[in-house]
Amino acid sequence: MFAKAFFKPQLICLFFLAFVLVSSVHEKEAKAFSGQVIQRGAVGDDVIELQARLQYIGFYSGRIDGAFGWNTYWAVRNFQSKYGLPVDGVAGETTKQKLTKASKYNEQFVKEQIRKGNEFTHYGGKPLEQQVKSSGGQAKTNASRPQNANNQPVKTTAANVPSGFSQNDIQWIANAVYGESRGEPYIGQVAVAAVILNRVSSPSFPNTVYGVIFEPLAFTAVADGQIWLTPNENAKRAVLDAINGWDPTDGATYYFNPDTATSKWIWGRPQIKKIGKHIFCR
Amino acid sequence: MFRALLIMILSIGAISTAYWGYREHQEKNAVLIRAENNYQRAFNDLTYEIDLLHDKIGATLAMSSRTSLSPALAEVWRLTSNAHNDVGQLPLTLLPFNKTEDFLAQIGDFSYQTAIRDLEKEPLNEKEYTLLEQMYKRAGDIQNELRSVQRLVLKNNLRWMDVELALAADKKPLDNTIIDGLKTVEKNVESYAETDFGPTATSMEKEEKGFSRLEGREISKEDAKKIAKKFLGLKGTEQMSVEQSGKGANNRFYSVSIQQPQTNSITYMDITKKGGYPIWVMNNREIRGQKISLNDAAAKGLQFLKEHKFENMELYDSAQYDSVGMFTYVTNINGVRVYPESIQMKVALDDGGIVGFSAKDYLSSYKKRSIAKPAITVEEARKKISKNVKVMEERQAIIVSNLKKEVLCYEFLGVYGKDTYQIFINAQSGMEEKVKKLQNVERVYE
């Protein structure tokens, strides 16, 4: 159906005109950036704009994904050094101003591509239509979005992850934590996640997260299939906290519920503290 | 007529139930056999790896030249890692098999450290040879015992699934040959591991993170409450409870929990008994939408540290997770970053409040330092870096090396292709201490 419409020349003209109109109006109105200072680790619309603008003038060649990682950091620094600004890799007031002057940002185009899940670039001096590689399929669901959605924040297509862990690793640990301790207070969930991580770094246990989680009979939640329950956001946050350095257990590698523990051996372990229903031990 | 029909229906029902039951039974058996096979594979692999390990350690004892010794030690390291992996797949967690795993880890550490060492400059010394001999002997003992268990398993058709069921049912597994055999293995290693490793081996075991360097007097429960109140800026009307750590704790500490009625949450905090230092703080209140920037939050975290007498800290890493900012701060002494002294902080991006603090690393590595002058210049150090890497940033830093010692280095941040690398060159010897690819943001897979 789409292909048919394109054969009509007047339609193409109309389409093109509309595009030019919309984009030019947009550029005039575009208030560049919000007031915040953008630094490494930030995510969101400002980062999308920062990346798109840097790409427009050739400083940034990575994906425009809305997450301020190392590549964005170097792009900002290179821009700062080229434009005679203090080089710190942080996009503050002056950097944003200079960048806004030096570049253009087609917010509508960029956000539309992100919503559609397309691979795209935003280089200046090259027709935008040529910079899109459609991922197909998803466009249908997004076509019904109202036009004025363009100023709404979009979901970033990349996320921060703690060093050495992927989002999937975090999800798996969260599954285990949720299965093991979903009735526990938040701190108890962080503690269970910490035990998993302590086991990974302990010589007495397997050396990988998956080795530890799936060690036969190590965790009841794995043995009885509760690990397949979908964890809630709390469990995931608990895992992130544990990975980022919070260990409420002082290095525990075992824990048990004194009401249900069947093994006598576990009572012999030196106990560290009790959190919620679990006793944590070495 | 009716009766005949009923009989027919009932018999059809009975037959199909029987058929269904038979299918279920078959499927269950198939699953059991598959699980059993996995265990058998792990166990038989383990015995095989230990065989190889024993042989390889034996071979290294007879070697003298560096060129053959280093690869042989690397091979030992690989085998221990494989064997360790196999142990992890056996259903032994309810059975104390830790000592054997520790033993494997120790052989692994030892062989790794000696394999990467320049044996031309620093050949194996006498103590290390003695150690290697002891490892050889012990590996031989383990090999023998595992083989006899393996033999019994074969002869009597023993099943690991039976072990698992026995363990799960918590029956006294009196007549279980597998468990008995493995217990002997464990006992043998135990008698060895505690005694023979001696002082040379201390660096091989994972360093226990203790706060041994902390100064100050022992504090009481009441003191702990006061410290928590001051550290968290409490009004004093909150409900607090304090508990002491158990006997198993490396560092004796108090656990304080504080009810916060206005946010309907609880703040947890651990404080060392000696000196009363806050180890970590965590609050789990609900955090609403983002109001302040990551940058402002980082400044708030730093301000907090300054107010609580953590001197010379600077921001090292920042990351936003939903509406929480996660920050790592490290000490900077006259331009030298001290990476082991790091503090993690969590700042809520709705109102900039501190919702998390962790000084575990800081407390276990903090000390008064006199930082030595580097023996080589930064230019000399830069020459040691691969030419493929474009250096973007440089500074001096103290890190913990692979041998778990603190070393002064030149730190370089560089780019190669689309990746960023952090490279540490030892400022005394010029050795490349660590090269780390820095984690970038990860693409979201939908």
Image (cartoon, rainbow, N blue to C red):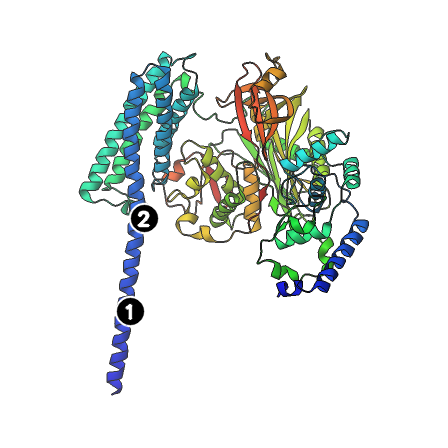
Of the 4 image quadrants, the one containing the N terminus of chain B is bottom left
Q: Mark 1 sits on what residue?
A: B17
Quarter of the image for residue A65 reads top right
Write down the chain letter for disc 2: B
Secondary structure beneath label 1: helix
Where residue A223 appears, x then y in whole percent? 39, 49
First in sequence: mark 1 or mark 2? 1
Q: Amino acid at mark 2?
A: Ala
Where residue A104 appears, x then y in whole percent? 76, 44
Cα separation between marks 1 and 2: 27 Å
Left or right: B181 in relation to A13: left
Left or right: B151 in relation to B217: left
Left or right: B423 in relation to A221: right
Where residue B330 appears, x then y in whole percent? 63, 27
Please determine whether, in this image, residue A58 is positioned above or below residue B166. Answer: above
The residue most toward the right is: A28
Marks 1 and 2 belong to one chain: yes
Decide: few, some or many residues near mark 2? Use Cα within 10 Å; few <14, some 14-19, many ≥20: some
Considering depth in this image, is A193 or A165 the residue closer to the camera?
Answer: A165
Left or right: A12 in relation to B328: right
Q: Amino acid at mark 1?
A: Thr
Quarter of the image for residue B293 reads top right
Write down the chain letter for disc 1: B
Q: Mark 2 sits on what residue?
A: B35
Considering depth in this image, is A9 or A143 the residue closer to the camera?
Answer: A9
